[in-house]
Amino acid sequence: MKFMTRFLMAMAAVTLLTVTVLPSLAQEGYKLRRVFKVNDIRRYKMVMDMNGEMQMGENSMPLNMQMVMTYREKVAGIKDGKATVHTTFESMKMYMNGQEFVSPMAPDMSNMVITTVIDDRNKVYEVKGLEKVAMGAPGMGNLNIGAGFNSPAMFPEGEIKVGDSWETEVPIPNAGDLKLTAKQTFVSVEKVGGVDAARIKTEFEMPFERLMASMAGQSPAGMPPMTGTMKVVSYTYFDLATGNVLKVDGDMVMSIQMQGSGNPQMPQNMQMNMTAKISLTQVKETSTK
């Protein structure tokens, strides 16, 4: 169970990253750009409901988990056209089958600060402070989830219109040359809390077999071979005036197989099927930190 908790939290972080990896959009002269102001604060709440089943040999166990996280982003400074953004975590709770639990593998995020230096096109120049989020999981150490925790994509120059679709290659940190290909569709312009927002659909698939092959030599000793896929379809709403994420709604379907291991601490011949509903919303600032 410790291994599964670590793995599911790592996958939650990957999903949070990738469901909002989107390029810029423009409609008849509009371009999406980040607009930074010193001391500007945005606060977000993310809820992920995960349901599925894990089977090990002849034994099976239902999986009903929920993760609720609240975090805030603050623009600490602007220099030479680049903003320094601090991401801090107010709370993170996990529930198993309706009961709150504290995993021994969960990091202490109370004093964690992720510092990201980015420009108005969301190009990332530097990220610090992700070591605890990684939780020792291979490939998680350098995820740029602090670029605006939920929106690390660089915005390109081109313009697009409602109905246009395009693809974006997303490199996976510590995974060699492996890149995900995400398909985006500019669905509509809608109001979110009275704000004009671009609604973008994102679709991507992560092949675990290719991921594990790309991370050869980084996995823990005795880690069994892993195959399967994780598919995500999400809708992200971007503020047309500021380029900030207003909210995200997504669905994930994951199927994983592990075949044998020489390490008795690792799962043996495991099959896991999981679905998840992902919700991210911008909420009112309540802290004076």
Image (cartoon, helix red, strand yellow):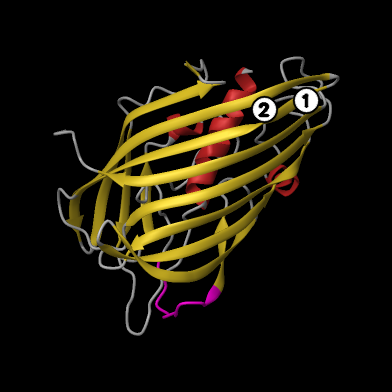
Residue at point 54%, 31% (across, down): 9
Q: Quadrant of residue 50?
A: top right
Q: Looking at this view, is 187 or 121 the one in front? A: 187
Looking at the image, can residue 246 be seen? Answer: yes
Residue with the mark numbered 2: 220
| Structural distance between the alpha carbons of marks 1 and 2 | 22 Å
Residue with the mark numbered 1: 55
Residue at point 44%, 57% (across, down): 236
Whole-percent x and y of residue 271? Answer: 78, 31
Pointer 1 or 2: first along the chain: 1
- The amino acid sitting under disc 1 is Gln
Q: Residues within 10 Å of mark 2 (few under 14, many from 20)?
A: few
In the rendered image, the vertical position of residue 141 relative to residue 169, given as above or below: above
- The amino acid sitting under disc 2 is Pro
Residue 55 highlighted magenta (yes or no): no
SS of the residue under disc 1: strand
Residue at point 15%, 48% (across, down): 39
Whole-percent x and y of residue 269? Answer: 82, 26
The dot on residue 185 is: none
Q: Residues within 10 Å of mark 1 (few under 14, many from 20)?
A: some
Q: Looking at this view, is 214 or 98 the one in front? A: 98
Residue 164 highlighted magenta (yes or no): yes
Q: Quadrant of residue 15?
A: top right
Magenta segment, prevailing SS (helix, strand or loop):
loop
> Which stretch appears magenta?
155-165
Q: Is residue 116 left or right of residue 201?
A: left
